């Protein structure tokens, strides 16, 4: 396999309940987030996404427009570390869409770093970038879901802490906290028919992974660990998110779902 290999074309399922459903995705400009945005657009959902990378966001908007979508997605430039800006953006999206039914907390940064070089400032940055905004996005979006008696919150985690990967401890530790958010708030919101789940990727072949971290040796090791002896692609990962957002996943909450090719 090479860095330029692309995913096969697949005729994925369509979910009638996702047509016109209002969806907000954080970190939707590229990578897994872009795939999630594009797949919701394909379903006919009304989608907004937040990201700091305006150039990549414009690429995502162009890719979605080329599909001739039922609804054009809307992009709001936001640095999610700025909780005030995050809250303001969610308020705008809620006003535009008359509410948000699905929140996908996706934005994160898996920059590599050594444990013995982490400063208190860098530690705070890793937590703020990979965990804190998940909670505050939920805090801003959930009240309307509770009032409507319907909602799905999907937190994108990482299997890195489960795999005991040690080349980005601040990221892996922050991502382990995502499961704490999911389990705690699923119990809180359950009586209001608002579901909270985590979807964890293994090694997903995004542009960032292939251009920054990919090596033949690394891929060989990953495929050796996986039950499926091939790459996992962003659009494949997004299918689990769609299921949990749709009415088909209405009985699922407080769970974590691995999309990792059966990695041990």
Image (cartoon, rainbow, N blue to C red):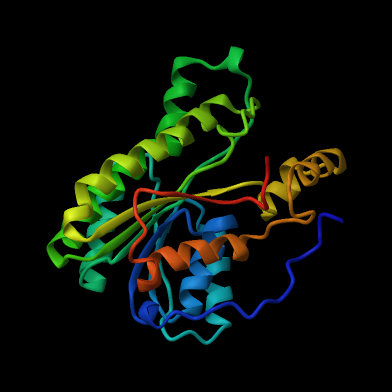
Nearest the camera: 70 or 233? 233
Nearest the camera: 30 or 143? 143
Please tell me which residue is depicted at 79% across the width and 47% down the height of the picture: 223
Res 125 quadrant in image:
top left
The answer to whether 229 appears left or right of 234 in the picture is right
Question: Where does residue 231 sit, x and y in percent of width and height?
Answer: 74, 56
Question: Which quadrant of the figure contains the N terminus?
Answer: bottom right
Q: Is residue 82 visible?
A: no
Question: Which quadrant of the figure contains the C terminus?
Answer: top right
Nearest the camera: 218 or 193? 193
In the figure, 43 relative to 128: above or below? below
Please tell me which residue is depicted at 57% across the width and 56% down the height of the picture: 32
Question: Where does residue 162 sit, x and y in percent of width and height?
Answer: 57, 34
Question: Where does residue 22 sit, x and y in percent of width and height?
Answer: 32, 71
Q: Is residue 16 visible?
A: yes
The answer to whether 35 appears left or right of 25 in the picture is right
The answer to whether 252 appears left or right of 174 in the picture is left
């Amino acid at each position: 396999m090479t860095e330029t290999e692309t995913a096969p074309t697949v005729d994925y399922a369509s979910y009638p309940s996702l047509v016109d459903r209002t969806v907000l995705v954080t970190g939707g400009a590229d990578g897994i987030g872009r795939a999630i945005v594009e797949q919701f657009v394909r379903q006919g959902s009304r989608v907004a996404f937040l990201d700091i990378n305006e150039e990549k966001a414009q690429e995502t908007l162009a890719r979605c427009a080329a599909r001739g979508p039922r609804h054009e997605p809307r992009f709001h430039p936001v640095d999610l570390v700025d909780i005030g800006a995050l809250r303001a953006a969610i308020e705008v999206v809620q006003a535009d869409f008359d509410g948000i039914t699905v929140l996908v907390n996706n934005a994160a940064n898996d920059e590599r770093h050594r444990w013995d070089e982490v400063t208190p400032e860098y530690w705070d940055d890793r937590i703020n970038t990979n965990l804190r905004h998940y909670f505050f996005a939920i805090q801003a979006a959930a009240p309307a879901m509770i009032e409507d008696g319907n909602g799905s919150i999907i937190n994108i985690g990482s299997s890195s802490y489960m795999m005991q990967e040690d080349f980005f401890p601040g990221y892996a530790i922050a991502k382990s906290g995502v499961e704490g958010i999911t389990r705690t708030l699923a119990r809180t919101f359950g009586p209001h028919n608002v579901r909270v789940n985590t979807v964890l990727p293994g090694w997903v072949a995004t542009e960032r992974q292939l251009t920054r971290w990919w090596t033949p040796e690394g891929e060989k090791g990953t495929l050796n660990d996986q039950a499926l002896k091939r790459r996992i692609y962003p659009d494949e990962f997004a299918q689990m998110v769609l299921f949990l957002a749709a009415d088909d996943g209405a009985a699922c909450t407080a769970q974590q779902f691995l999309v990792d090719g059966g990695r041990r």
